Image (cartoon, helix red, strand yellow):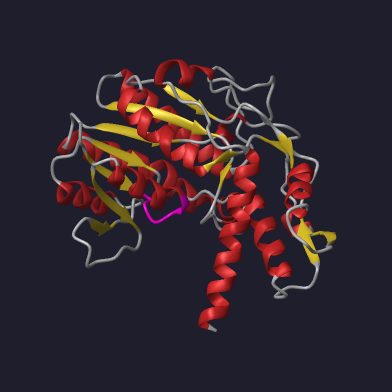
């Protein structure tokens, strides 16, 4: 059944793909971000850190079946540089949205996108939804606060909320501030002769659970349809791989030799050695399983950056 859905943070990496996917599924998609195309009647700019801006957004949207809340500061170094701002956007922004929904669209469902960062250094693997919180940076702390508040509101019966805790995900269109996209961009640039054959890296020993963004988008659509109100679901591939092995796999896909250079600026403090998710609960409830392989993810990233660089050459 077609729904009327509002997506916050819609101009971000996942948001753009989610808008396209849900539109293709026949839903009416409204979207918002700090900046949008003002000529698009389905778009409206909003600063979620301001309650008045959020109220105006929800009033403008009119009747809705659901709101998918992606809007957040997600890059950990940015959060560390300005922890007050990250709390304003990630925590207070979520509270503002909940209050506006309760007032204007109390019957609508909210899909809140949290993060695996809330778990911090794992006490056991794979990490399931019962794993205790142990946030180790301002971004994770802000998401713990928002996650807890969403759980409280849902338990109190004030709003229909489903929470998602995605683990690492990547794919075409992701900014090169993130590790896999950074490697792919650098390798494509070296391959095209735009960069010296030196690839700058951070911590290669860490192991992470990576998903393709297409699987994430599909998961959000399923959770919106079949998730149980008040529940929380982990979202991951169920497997971990070291950053070193990901780098090796990407290097094997290009016909250039590179020198690996450690960049202290890319080393994250309080690095967690290994993270691996359990998606069994979400699979049981909503029938989701990852469909894209890790190798497909790497291929798609390289193809994307090659096309971007080729387009720059064509226009330059």
Q: Is residue 71 visible?
A: no
Query: In the visual, does 113 lie left or right of 313?
Result: left
**On the image, which quarter does residue 191 sit in?**
bottom right
- The answer to whether residue 218 is magenta is no
Query: In the visual, does 78 lie left or right of 111?
Result: right
Q: Residue at x 55, y 37 (%)?
A: 292
Q: Residue at x 30, y 56 (%)?
A: 46
Query: In the visual, does 145 lie left or right of 78?
Result: left
Q: Quadrant of the C terminus?
A: bottom right
Residue 305 vs 292, above or below: the answer is: below
Residue 89 vs 155, above or below: the answer is: below
Q: Residue at x 73, y 32 (%)?
A: 274
Q: Which residues are magenta?
A: 8-13
Residue 220 in the image: state x and y as whole percent: 40, 34
**On the image, which quarter does residue 69 sit in?**
top left
Query: In the visual, does 250 lie left or right of 135?
Result: right
Viewer-proximal residue among 134 and 124: 124
Residue 115 in the image: state x and y as whole percent: 52, 36
Q: Residue at x 40, y 21 (%)?
A: 286
Task: Considering the whole magenta stretch, tell me its main secondary structure.
Answer: loop
Residue 273 in the image: state x and y as whole percent: 76, 34
């Amino acid at each position: 059944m077609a729904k009327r859905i509002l997506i916050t943070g819609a101009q971000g990496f996942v948001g753009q793909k989610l808008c396209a996917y849900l539109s293709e599924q026949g839903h009416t998609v409204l979207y918002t971000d700090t900046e949008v195309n003002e000529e698009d009647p389905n778009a409206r700019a909003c600063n979620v850190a301001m309650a008045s801006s959020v109220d105006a957004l929800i009033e403008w949207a009119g009747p809705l079946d659901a709101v998918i809340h992606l809007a957040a500061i997600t890059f950990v170094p940015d959060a560390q540089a300005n922890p007050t701002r990250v709390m304003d956007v990630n925590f207070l922004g979520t509270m503002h949205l909940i209050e506006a929904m309760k007032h204007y669209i109390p019957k609508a469902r909210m899909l809140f996108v949290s993060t695996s960062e809330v778990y911090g250094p794992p006490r056991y693997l794979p990490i399931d939804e019962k794993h205790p919180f142990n946030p180790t940076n301002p971004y994770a702390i802000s998401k713990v606060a928002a996650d807890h508040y969403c759980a409280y509101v849902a338990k109190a019966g004030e709003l229909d909320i489903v929470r998602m805790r995605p683990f690492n995900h990547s794919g075409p269109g992701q900014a090169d501030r993130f590790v896999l996209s950074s490697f792919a961009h650098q390798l494509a640039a070296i391959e095209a002769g735009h960069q010296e054959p030196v690839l700058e890296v951070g911590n290669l020993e860490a192991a992470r659970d990576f998903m393709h963004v297409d699987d994430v988008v599909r998961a959000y659509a399923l959770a919106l349809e079949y998730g149980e109100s008040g529940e929380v679901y982990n979202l991951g591939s169920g497997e971990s791989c070291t950053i070193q092995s990901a780098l090796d796999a990407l290097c094997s896909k290009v016909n250039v030799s590179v020198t690996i250079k450690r960049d202290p600026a890319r080393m994250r403090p309080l690095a967690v050695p290994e993270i691996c998710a359990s998606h069994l609960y979400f699979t049981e409830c909503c029938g989701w399983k990852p469909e894209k392989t890790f190798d497909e993810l790497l291929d798609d990233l390289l193809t994307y950056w090659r096309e971007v660089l080729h387009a720059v050459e064509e226009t330059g």
